[in-house]
Image (cartoon, rainbow, N blue to C red):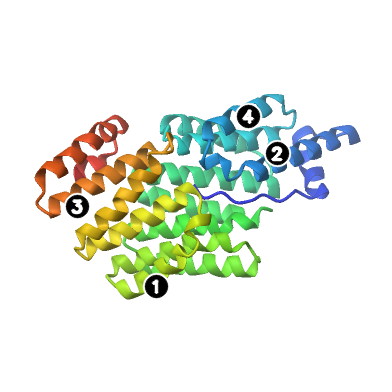
Amino acid sequence: MRKGLNRQIRFYICLVIGFMVLGACVPEDIETICTEMKAFERFSRINGDSLAIVPRKIRTEALRRMEQAKDSLAKYNYLAMVMKTYLVTTQLDSAQMMIRRLSSFIEGQEEVPGMADLESECFNMKGNVFARMGKMDSAEFCFRRSYERRMKGTKVEVIPDILMNLADASNRLGKLNVGAAWYRKALLMCDSLHLSSSKKPPIYYGLAQVYVTMRDFDLCDYYYNLAGESYDSMLPYEKYIYLNNRGTSYYYREDYRTAIEYFRKVVGLVEGYSDMNFELNLGLMNLGDCYLQLHEADSAVKYINECQPFFEKMDVKAALYYI
């Protein structure tokens, strides 16, 4: 679910897209297409961070702009933004419906950079949905396809985000060496593309999690400390991942009291965002587990009972099995 800042598409790309969509276009048609894509790029750039904070507001505006767009590529780029908002609000059925609609549009379209970017967005979202459902083999495949398609597109600045998703999927499949390699490639991409340093903290805490799994807590803390230096500038979802994963590191050290401190911070953070219900309930489940390990059964039951109905409604089998 990472979001990159989009760059304006050059005129010659708009020209290619114009002939692809409309056939032999008159100059006014080409100008309309380029203008609409520039409008989308500006909207995406301005609202990229807001998507994770006020997703429903962004969804409403993206749908309005989508209805008004005359160019198909611009229209479906707005649809891709709508698709992302459904993932943020944990409306997976709606997200999957948007994915099917976007996939149907992409099928049969000609190979141009703008279409490769759009197809990459679609695969990235598929991967995120599969990851939420615990289907990590499918998630890894989709993230890899997203990376391959983005390499043929124009918005290369979002590649580190895709590589982070690919690394996480690899880690969850137990392929730690592969996951670490993808994270390090993401760091190299940030440097080679001269991207903002704000891209790096999620890579740092991703590498930290690799070392948690390997039980190398010295390197784990090294990378968590690097990430923590940028905590105040992180987006809410990034703060959530940092706190949750750092809490997990203490859980595996059997330092349950410190783990509880971090998981309480998780709950306190996400309670302020009505669309982070998945993250809230995961935090509650982790608190329940920690209290169980401390043999404080009453507290454990309290938190488990709070989160179980949510996971039953969402049919998250991995969480239900864990509960």
Q: Which residue is mark 2?
A: 40
Residue found at x 59% / y 65%: 190
Distance between the alpha carbons at the discs numbered 4 and 2: 11 Å
Distance between the alpha carbons at the discs numbered 3 and 2: 46 Å
Depth check: 158 or 269 in front? 269
Instruction: Give the crowd class for mark 1: few <14, some 14-19, many >=20 residues within 10 Å.
Output: some
Q: Which residue is mark 3?
A: 290
Chain-order first, disc 3 or disc 1: 1
Chain-order first, disc 1 or disc 4: 4
Marks 3/1 in contact by CB < 8 Å: the verdict is no
Q: Which residue is mark 1?
A: 222
Residue 70 x, y percent position in the rendering: 75, 28
Chain-order first, disc 2 or disc 1: 2
Res. 280 mark: none
Find the residue positioned furthest to the right: 27
Depth check: 140 or 279 in front? 279
Res 151 visible: no
Question: Which secondary structure lies at badge 4?
Answer: helix
Q: Which residue is mark 4?
A: 61
Q: Is residue 196 left or right of residue 145?
A: right
Depth check: 296 or 248 in front? 296
Residue 116 x, y percent position in the rendering: 64, 48
Res 248 visible: yes
Distance between the alpha carbons at the discs numbered 1 and 4: 42 Å
Residue 318 x, y percent position in the rendering: 26, 44
Question: Which secondary structure lies at badge 2?
Answer: helix
Residue found at x 52% / y 46%: 123
